[in-house]
Amino acid sequence: MSPENGCPADASAEAGERKAPSNFIRSIVEEDLRNSKNDGRVLTRFPPEPNAYLHIGHAKSICLNFGVAASYGGLCNLRFDDTNPTTEEAEYVDSIKEDVRWLGFDWGDRLFYASDYFEQLYEFAVQLVRAGKAYVCDLSADEIRETRGTLTQPGKESPYRDRPVEENLELFTRMRAGEFPDGSRVLRAKIDMASPNVNLRDPVMYRILHASHHRTGDAWCLYPTYDFAHGQSDSLEGITHSICTLEFEDHRPLYDWYLDQLGLHHPQQIEFARLNLTDTVLSKRRLLKLVQGGHVARFDDPRMPTLSGLRRRGYTPAAIRDFCERIGVAKADSTVDMALLEYCLREDLNRNSPRVMAVLRPLKVVLENYPEGQVEEVEAVNNPEDETAGTRQVPFSRVLYLERDDFMEDPPKKFYRLAPGREVRLRYAYYLKCESVIKDGDGEVVELRCTYDPETKGGSAPDGRKVKATLHWVSAEHALTAEVRLYDYLFTKKDPADVEEGGDWLNNVNPNSLEALSDCRVEPSVAGAAPGARYQFERQGYFCVDPDSAVDRPVFNRTVTLKDTWAKVQAQQQG
Ligand code: ATP
Ligand code: MG
């Protein structure tokens, strides 16, 4: 990981050094180490299916798998479970690798693909056929579903269940050779159609799919199911602790069955509750729908909960890792408030973002008593949270821009900012007083005529008179014009997926989640900032340079506002 984006070379090392909070998975690993299980080895893996971009839920799994390994001197593999060529793409593989690296984790030379094991898995399947533990079934997908039974009713045995071994072997070989069309036959494990666990009711191991695979091309027209590939892949890699989400709990007996029949090493599967987050959706299927339906621009749209979207929005890897540590790991499902994620982000950005002044909705201000053509520099603090960050010079001149919202011609009682006749402080500069207002034909204020007090340089008056507001500003002649994109939540409901019977969660998409301001002004010190650079715009929030930027026209995403809502959420949860 390159240092310029503020990420340590290997966050797993860092996470290992820091004392990570304990959880039940760590307790299991510690117990195993005490008992010298697996010869004291710890090997985990993160096993994404490359059928979409990763989201913040995956970050929980990544931090857990890499973090646990690092804590106990172990290693973590990255393995793509790429068993479904119809939904998987190389683009997703690349994005996943980029995201894991960006989060700060390193799989070293242990990058694997289930497709690396296709030949071996096929051999395993043949072994099961030979042992009379698997058979070729000619029922259609619908017929298999219909005969599977229910939670209360046993399934029905397939009429092909007792096919002789030789016939199964011959058919399976011909399936591989491409002699049969898609969907005409499958290979099924011969377990127990009456098992209370439906996963054990003769599950499908192989299906015929005449589809090109992003890695193996047209070498195969027969693909293993996820359930047949996953456990064996773990085993082949010598995984010690196979950490996965709760929905796989009921699949564990099936994985164990395959490994037992094949006489293979048993990784220990441990299930934990997946991350659910308010105000968004965390399912690859839904994220794909948001992209395909044009509700967002791309997978890395800054409103998306994808890691690439969060990165583009301005999230830091450190903030996401901190979040994953704070939410902990449990066995019971729960939903985490988005405010916690934002809190972790603000904590990091507050410490590490340089402050600059930017005016989002400019209002022209002329200082009538400031000499024409004169420019002076005022000294501004780069980061009050970091003494080593130093100061910078900001140009000040006769024509400035202030924030339109900081002026009211007819202010209500509690408005303490600028108004006709009123005096305020310009941050790092002088006191300024509004003398008169210029309007256009529609009665809209287009300019303020003001005076400044030369005695107040640095922001305090020698006579001790006080002002009630300090405003940010930029010098009109020196400021850069920028586009600023303000984001709101992508959904209008806290739980967007909660819809009435027959309703569509897409109806909860917020039509106003993006507001683009095209005529913003930013102080000149940010000129040339590269995409990904982060700032605090004083009083406005944290912002990040978007890749859409042009040299002479930066584009900023508002990462998050300054106002913390986590404390309020906590109070509500406790109260
Ligand atoms: P989705 O449900 O979003 O479609 P998935 O589980 O199908 O995701 P995979 O590519 O199979 O996605 O996931 C890779 C790993 O990440 C798995 O071990 C999975 O359990 C884990 N994972 C996926 N979503 C979450 C989540 N919300 N919280 C924690 N771990 C998750
Ligand atoms: Mg999955």
Image (spheres, rainbow, N blue to C red):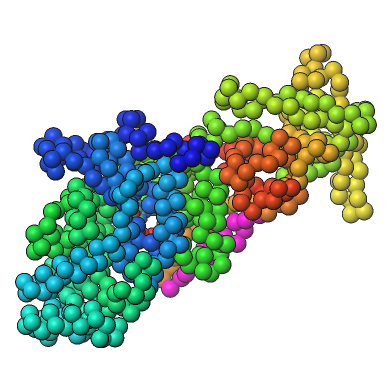
- Magenta-colored stretch includes residue 548: no
Q: Quadrant of the N terminus?
A: top left
- 504 in magenta: yes
Q: Is 228 or 446 nearer to us in this picture?
A: 228
Image vertical order of residue 282 relative to residue 501, above or below = above
> What residue do we see at 11% from left, 70% from top?
128
Q: Position of residue 82 (x, y in %)?
A: 33, 64
Eyeballing the image, is 137 above or below 271? below
In the image, what residue occupies the spot 70% across and 26% down? 392
Tell me the quarter of the picture where residue 470 sits. Answer: top right
Q: Residue at x 27, y 59 (%)?
A: 247
Q: Nearer the viewer, residue 343 or 38?
A: 38
In this picture, which residue range is highlighted in magenta?
Answer: 502-515
Q: Is residue 197 above or below residue 336?
A: below
Q: Is residue 242 visible to the viewer in this orientation of the structure? A: yes
Q: Residue at x 61, y 49 (%)?
A: 546
